Image (cartoon, helix red, strand yellow):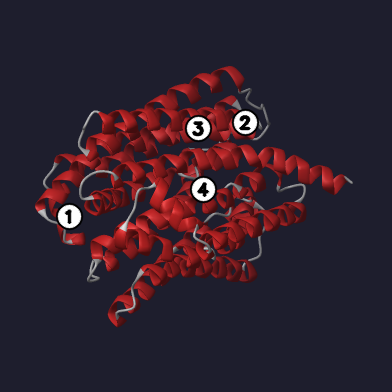
């Protein structure tokens, strides 16, 4: 009976976080749908996909800030330390995008890496200018979100992210109807959504959050850095997974179509991937008391998510979504639908990985996460090179590369855990 009550508690904590992730991802789906309705949709989708690859590389480094704030923000002094660290990290991570957005490097680098023409390079540079502030703004919002999750205000977090979605949708539809160029429509929507979300999150945090006053001394900036850099590396490697695949896909004969289709398929599949990532919040919040119960809960949810994605690939449902909702047609539609089936493996692999991630975050032994993330990107890069060299890189194999990378990361986490069993944070630092 107690186990059943805990499962209900986990579910009541978890489902608002799932909706939170879905709200954020729906913004990406609508962006793709709007871009698909511009003239030369494949080129617009490809330009945005390549530009966001640079942005995501830096933005992703702050993805684990909510967990850091949850773990360390146990007093007013600790909360201030977390905010100060996050502000410095966000400002530092914004700099590369600002440099790319306002110097000639922002024109030359995309041409050298992806082989784009002058027009696409100029559009990408404008994306860099518009998206650079969102790295800093979203970092601060992530810290506030982690504290609200610590206080088990997950419903409030969901409401905030639905509000973010509403702002982004409104700006996207306004820009499109007003006839703005695609880059201004999408860029202003992203920037406006980040500003509104930070303001609303800060307001509700100031009204709802009550800091603990634990006897644990506040973390030093050095301690926060030791915790942060491996998880930042983990997130950056997650963001690198797509650009690595796109890099090799850019040399395929049908590069524009393939990259555009993979971009749409990956974004759609994130609706099924992102709920798996929310397990880390569950583990950080409840993991000290009931690890096995959380494992059973995770297994059920992962199987459901993989099953739904599998059905999307095996039935016409996925193609219908791409055609009717996103407005895709022709070969882009065909490729995007073909990529869905291999992507059904990803939630299973991510579930195995996130089980180990939760343990590492809770015990403050995050270095193993960074090592495994590097292994994932290395596996994807080598496999992508092999696929393009053999002429096998297409929509199904491109999607399979992503699944294969997560499986490699999960295996790496398991191997490290076998060689170096989890121990207390104090023992880990002493070693």
Residue 258 in percent (x, y) is at 30, 63
Residue 431 in percent (x, y) is at 58, 60
The mark lying in front, picked from 2 and 4, is 2
Q: Reply above or below: 165 against 44.
A: above
The residue tagged 4 is: 227
Residue displayed at 16% across by 50% down: 120
343 on left or right of 260: right
First of labels 1, 3 by sequence position: 1
The residue tagged 1 is: 109
Q: Reply above or below: 15 against 352.
A: above
The mark lying in front, picked from 1 and 3, is 3
Residue 1 in percent (x, y) is at 89, 46
**Quadrant of residue 348 within the rendered picture:** bottom right
Residue 11 in percent (x, y) is at 71, 43
144 on left or right of 167: right
Residue displayed at 30% across by 76% down: 388
The residue tagged 2 is: 155
First of labels 1, 2 by sequence position: 1
Q: Nearer the viewer, residue 320 or 365?
A: 320
The mark lying in front, picked from 1 and 4, is 1
The mark lying in front, picked from 3 and 4, is 3
Residue displayed at 27% across by 40% down: 95
First of labels 2, 4 by sequence position: 2
**Quadrant of residue 195 within the rendered picture:** top left
**Whole-Å distance between the Cαs marked 1 and 4?**
31 Å
**Whole-Å distance between the Cαs marked 1 and 3?**
34 Å
Verify CB contact (< 8 Å) between mark 2 and mark 3: no
Q: Residues within 10 Å of mark 2 (few under 14, many from 20)?
A: some
């Amino acid at each position: 009976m107690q186990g059943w009550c805990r499962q209900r508690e986990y579910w009541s904590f978890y489902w608002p976080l799932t909706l939170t992730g879905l709200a954020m991802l729906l913004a990406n789906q609508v962006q793709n749908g709007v871009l698909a309705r511009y003239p030369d949709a494949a080129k617009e989708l490809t330009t945005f996909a390549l530009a966001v690859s640079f942005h995501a590389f830096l933005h992703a480094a702050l993805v684990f800030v909510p967990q850091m704030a949850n773990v360390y923000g146990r007093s007013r002094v600790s909360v201030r330390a977390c905010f100060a660290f996050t502000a410095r990290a966000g400002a530092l991570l914004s700099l590369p995008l600002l440099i790319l957005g306002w110097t000639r490097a922002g024109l030359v680098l995309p041409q050298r890496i992806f082989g784009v023409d002058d027009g696409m390079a100029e559009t990408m540079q404008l994306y860099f200018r518009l998206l650079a502030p969102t790295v800093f703004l979203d970092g601060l919002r992530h810290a506030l979100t982690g504290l609200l999750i610590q206080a088990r205000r997950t419903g409030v977090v969901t409401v905030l992210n639905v509000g973010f979605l509403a702002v982004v949708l409104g700006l996207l539809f306004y820009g499109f109807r007003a006839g703005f160029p695609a880059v201004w429509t999408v860029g202003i929507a992203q920037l406006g959504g980040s500003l509104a979300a930070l303001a609303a999150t800060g307001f509700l945090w100031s009204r709802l959050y009550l800091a603990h006053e634990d006897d644990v001394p506040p973390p030093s900036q050095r301690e926060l850095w030791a915790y942060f850099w491996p998880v930042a590396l983990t997130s950056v490697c997650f963001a690198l997974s797509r650009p690595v695949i796109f890099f090799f896909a850019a040399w395929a004969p049908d590069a524009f179509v393939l990259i555009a289709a993979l971009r749409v398929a990956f974004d759609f599949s994130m609706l099924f991937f992102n709920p798996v990532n929310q397990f880390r919040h569950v583990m950080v919040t409840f993991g000290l008391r009931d690890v096995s119960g959380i494992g059973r809960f995770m297994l059920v949810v992962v199987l459901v998510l993989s099953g739904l994605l599998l059905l999307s690939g095996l039935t016409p449902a996925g193609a219908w979504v791409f055609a009717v909702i996103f407005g895709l047609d022709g070969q882009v539609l065909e490729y995007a639908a073909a990529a869905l089936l291999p992507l059904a493996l990803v939630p299973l692999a991510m579930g195995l990985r996130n089980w180990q991630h939760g343990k590492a975050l809770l015990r403050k032994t995050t270095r193993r996460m960074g090592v495994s993330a590097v292994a994932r990107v290395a596996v994807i890069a080598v496999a992508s090179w092999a696929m393009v060299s053999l002429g096998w890189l297409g929509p199904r194999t491109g999607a399979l590369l992503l699944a294969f990378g997560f499986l490699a990361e999960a295996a790496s986490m398991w191997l490290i855990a076998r060689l170096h069993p989890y121990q207390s944070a104090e023992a880990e630092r002493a070693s």
